[in-house]
Amino acid sequence: MRFDQTWTAVGKDGFEFSASVPGTIQSDYAKARNWGDIQYADTVYRFDEIEDWDWTYRTKLDFSAEVGEQVFFVAEGIDYRFDILLNGAVIYSQEGMYTPVKLDLTDRAKAGDLLEVYLYPRPWREGALVGDHAARSAADESCKAPVTYGWDWNPRLVNLGIWQDAYILTCKPEHIHACEPFYTLNEDRTRAEVRFETECQGLVTYTVTDPDGMVIYEGTKPSFTVENPRLWWCNGQGEPALYRWTAKSASDEKSGNIGFRTVKLVRNVGADNVHGYPKSRYPAPITVELNGRRIFVKGSNFVNPEIFFGEITEARYEEQILLVKEANMNLLRVWGGAGVCKKSFYEICDREGILVWQEFMLACNNYIGTPHYLRILEQEATSILKSLRRYPSIAFWCGGNELFNAWSGMDEQSMALRLLNKLCYDLDPSRPFMMTAPLEGMAHGSYTFFSEGKDVFQRFNACRNTAYSEFGVPSISPVESLKRVIPEEERFPMRETDAWTAHHGYHAWVGDTWLCNEIYDGYFGKPESLEERVEQSNWLQSVGYQAIFEEARRQWPHCSMALNWCLNEPWITAGNNSLIAYPNLPKPAFYAVKNSLAGQVPSARVEKFLWKAGEMFAAEVWYLNDLPKTAEEELTISLTVNGETQELLRWSTGTVGENQNKLGPTVHVQLPDEALDPSLILTVTTASGKSNSYRLLFVGKKQTVRKAATMNV
Amino acid sequence: MRFDQTWTAVGKDGFEFSASVPGTIQSDYAKARNWGDIQYADTVYRFDEIEDWDWTYRTKLDFSAEVGEQVFFVAEGIDYRFDILLNGAVIYSQEGMYTPVKLDLTDRAKAGDLLEVYLYPRPWREGALVGDHAARSAADESCKAPVTYGWDWNPRLVNLGIWQDAYILTCKPEHIHACEPFYTLNEDRTRAEVRFETECQGLVTYTVTDPDGMVIYEGTKPSFTVENPRLWWCNGQGEPALYRWTAKSASDEKSGNIGFRTVKLVRNVGADNVHGYPKSRYPAPITVELNGRRIFVKGSNFVNPEIFFGEITEARYEEQILLVKEANMNLLRVWGGAGVCKKSFYEICDREGILVWQEFMLACNNYIGTPHYLRILEQEATSILKSLRRYPSIAFWCGGNELFNAWSGMDEQSMALRLLNKLCYDLDPSRPFMMTAPLEGMAHGSYTFFSEGKDVFQRFNACRNTAYSEFGVPSISPVESLKRVIPEEERFPMRETDAWTAHHGYHAWVGDTWLCNEIYDGYFGKPESLEERVEQSNWLQSVGYQAIFEEARRQWPHCSMALNWCLNEPWITAGNNSLIAYPNLPKPAFYAVKNSLAGQVPSARVEKFLWKAGEMFAAEVWYLNDLPKTAEEELTISLTVNGETQELLRWSTGTVGENQNKLGPTVHVQLPDEALDPSLILTVTTASGKSNSYRLLFVGKKQTVRKAATMNV
């Protein structure tokens, strides 16, 4: 039986306050001290005062155990280094937030005893660089999610706390302490051999039902065979078939899902050979092969949905994953900077058919691998692997984010990555492991609509990478959100105030990221209102993501993946590359991406965003299909210029094969000599009602286009 | 005590013959059958008859043991799958040639008993492709050195046999069954903590002497500290300081060396950043950092010195390694195709200061990693690691040759390579491990003087790779060697006969590799004699290797390595990229390379090999220094054209820093309008007597240069 406890906490100032478990201690303190809406203005900087504090959680134990029952204190995750004290004496110590604690208190503790969890101050590597918003290198000798040390869209707020469930557990002798199913599929996936590894003193009966709820196995033998299992598929490729298992002993019951599938990372078509001598290696494999089928991976980068990890709930995960599914995505990259999610995240992904690229908690640092660090990493990665390998949605493991780039400095020889490769090999051999992304052939960025003299159409049409696992186009947050966080008098015109800066509108990365007014001014001139500027940013974000996602799809199968940076955000930013504003507001770009990622959709390759009067407009027509079924459509291509729409062409696609695209004709149109309306809209529709429109910018022949940004990101 | 045995063997035909141990069974059979010189003509094809045979070695045991002594049958290596039988009964079975056997026969065997080693037929993966010379894919599910399945310079002759020492060992109770020293160095390498891991029933006394023979430790404690140890350095960078240890028990003694050094693979200078977005990863680390010092690695690829591995002796290794040292090289890549050498190889490298890049026995195949294969690989790699990690000369481990190239098909996800990473991490964590070569940034090839329309000057001057771990320029073998193997009537003009083809003169790779007459004809026209053609090939090989090695050195530190393909060869080839002809004859190119690799040497970057009358000749002057000491020289640059030598320039280098090069002036010379002598010789000399000459080809203005080869290799 589980007994939740009532907790208080006390920090360095001796002030005792009510503590939430699960929760984050700084959030509880702020509430108790009535700091108000921490989203507002630069309130978040108040956390600097308590940044280096240590804390103690306290509870008077409240439980009752029957004779013969064991008593445990279970904490599924405590962030980060801690001692556990019973009646004032340390009975356990640990470093690491991902390794659960299960402390046997039988005959040691009774109701009313004082249990304390003492948290050491947050780890902070001496000599770490501290920027305006971030001190990520302070995290490079610990296994914390480095994002809490500050990122260009997340305030520095190094979480501490009992961030996952913690409770007293009383167990009868037949308690099932662990039960995990493993399976092997034969080569053609027509037979699965399943076996359970179970920790229980008594007899256990297993019941397994198929996705329709029909019992397919019942018995005490911990192994059985499934003939012709229904396979687990990701969104768009089939149903995410889940079998349900229950293990029952005389006094306990555990249950879970099994999803039968194979997943591999294979080399991209057409990227296999490298011509000429001297000859280097070919690009790294990054095509996902699910159940023997190569698929185009389309999705997004998932970050912590809250700045306080302890406050992330199943409901928060669920509302965001449902949007991911709605957006026709099939994979989320759980970005290493934010570490590993709680289990409910993976349960929902299993159910909704969303593949997961799971990273360990390394990002943008050189984790040089001191003996102490490697020991904690081994412990934490082992716990993560054992806890998550059961979820079929997890497609592959990755060491962390951008570790083989100049701002990190790791490489194939880094012991931390060699260790992770080894642990994955030992504990989860059927899943791929890659050390980091990007690897050879893959790419990250760019992150603005316009940089290095090119807009995203020009830039990505010229790229030939195998996978785009990050790319971003920002927009400014919804006006309602900004009204909550930016004091009225500072809102418009936007300017470098503490509130805008605290919300990453300035100096978050380069210049005015993530507001990027310089770019918008370049295209549109100075805005009349906040609303107008936000709308302009949404225009660019929508058409920009449309351009990149569709170009990546057109390059299939040489390119096998497009994941924008990023899906969501943990608090209200001034502007961000996210598709979903905090807490869960889809931006206009969300709907543009949803349309671009439809399984079957007409598409056009447009050269550039900005067109001048009198130019020859051209666009290449495509039909994109990443569903496992053929298509055949009648397309109509039209152009709206100066408010008038002309039909340019009709094209019958003929048969478009399963998981294949088809290139159609190229249309050419002489643009008029005068630009009367800035919206130049190319529309491709199908007879069956699908539609895809590109809203481009049309300007006069002699109009001087303002310098569109100096940003090279 | 060790008792060597007298062996016979019998094959499928029932013929019993005397067998050498160590040896290779096919060689013994051929000798017994009087097949004659197997180098001659196409005699080697006779081995096809016995290719799929099984064999049995036999010996009547000959030893005497005292009371209380244990008796073992020790076999340090049996190639490949075998049973061991005592008086007709199988007492042991194994697959794998690198895992030693130590079979306890105490109270089981007596003198006069029959001991047999039954060899199964050589492994042969069903469905493997068989070409004229090679069937390497037949080796892709076994842990044999794949070169014995045939290569473009090694006949297909799949070795079997007791290839390393095998004997009866009698042991008193205090026998030292194992003793291995381990050490850790502190960060600035001023203190070494040494400990021995020893397997012995009795008391063991350790004595350790420094490189001068002075005792620095004596005692029974298996650990001690060395203050300010003398470090082991490679050739050119310092002395290969070796400490000597002896472990003595009441009845036994073992000894060996310790070399204190640290070695890392770090990223190349200037190769760290990749500009622009979308941005991929940076190149893989391939600069060797020895004792904290980045060094330019110059060396060669070492292959099996004999086609029969059992016949490779310490003396053969030694004569070749001494040439390597003489050639100013500091590293040998022990190429995975030929597997792992016998221990004496590493002992000599330790002594002579030659670093070793050691590969596992994977090459140019897709070792897909069946469960059986992975099990044998784990066993074999474990044995190799435990046996070789004690040698300081071994700089790093590598999974194998060219596994990330189209002709192989492996990648980061290949289980065999993930397993090797894991084993190296577990068993030898202080040494780097790379999965294969080339990795990103590195390159292999080209392998001819002229290909894809460019000579090696043009080709390599334009390259910007981080390491050239293979590149080749062939020459035809010495005339004396050819006289031994090619029947007189076929020798000249060279033509596609069985003898020339068997010796890899034709169809070994592309067209007439490795004779390459097409290229020589292109430059020089048809030859008058065999001698003339061999001389022409030596000219191109010498100046070609000079061009590549020196260009790689000039690109230091962005480029950190140049290893030509290859140093040696296991039999008399018609032509080959080797510097040392079989068995141990340095070719003219050997001396050219020796000069190019001198620690301090003047050098010139020349644009191309072939110059026409009237052209403007140009060369960039350099002073190369990869010694850990400065230089200062006075250079004289002169050009010999039409038999007359003119001094072009003098240049004072000023101070050239340690392990640094210096760029000097560029000279320009108008070449005369007529070419009277084909040798155009650029010479750079120093006042201290160093000299470097480039013999180029000078032809008339209107002379039609014949098409120089179609080969693109």
Image (cartoon, coloured by chain):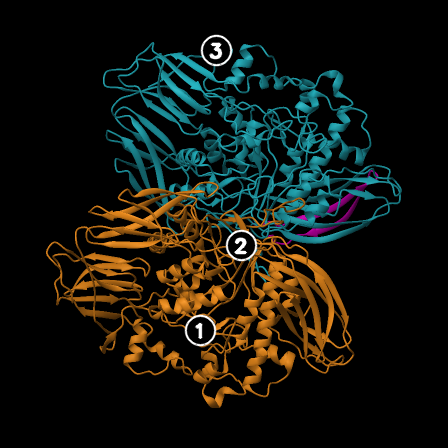
Chain colours: A orange, B cyan
- Please tell me if label 1 and label 2 are on a single chain: yes
Q: Position of residue A439 (x, y in %)?
A: 53, 54
**Dot 2 crowding, Cα within 10 Å, few <14, some 14–19, many 20+:** many
CB within 8 Å, label 1 to label 3: no
Q: Is residue A268 magenta?
A: no
User: Image check: B398 left or right of B711?
Assistant: left
Say if residue A513 shows up in the picture.
no
Residue B251 visible to an observer of this rendering: yes
Q: Which residue is mark 1?
A: A584
Q: Is residue A130 above or below residue B473?
A: below
| Residue, disc 2 | A439
Boundaries of the magenta span:
B630-656
- Which element type, helix, strand or loop, lies under badge 1? loop
Chain label for disc 2: A
Please identify the quarter of the rendering in which residue B537 is found.
top right
The verdict on a common chain for dots 1 and 3 is no
In this view, the residue farthest toward the bottom is A489
Disc on the earlier residue, 1 or 2: 2
Q: Report the Cα–Cα distance between label 2 and label 3.
A: 56 Å
Give the alpha-carbon distance from disc 1 to disc 3, as whole Å.
Answer: 83 Å
Residue B455 screen position, x and y as percent: 73, 42
Q: Position of residue B232 (x, y in %)?
A: 45, 41
* Residue drawn at the location 27% of the way across and 54% of the way down: A254
Indicate the amino acid at tag 2: Leu
Q: Which residue is mark 3?
A: B18
- Identity of the amino acid at label 1? Asn
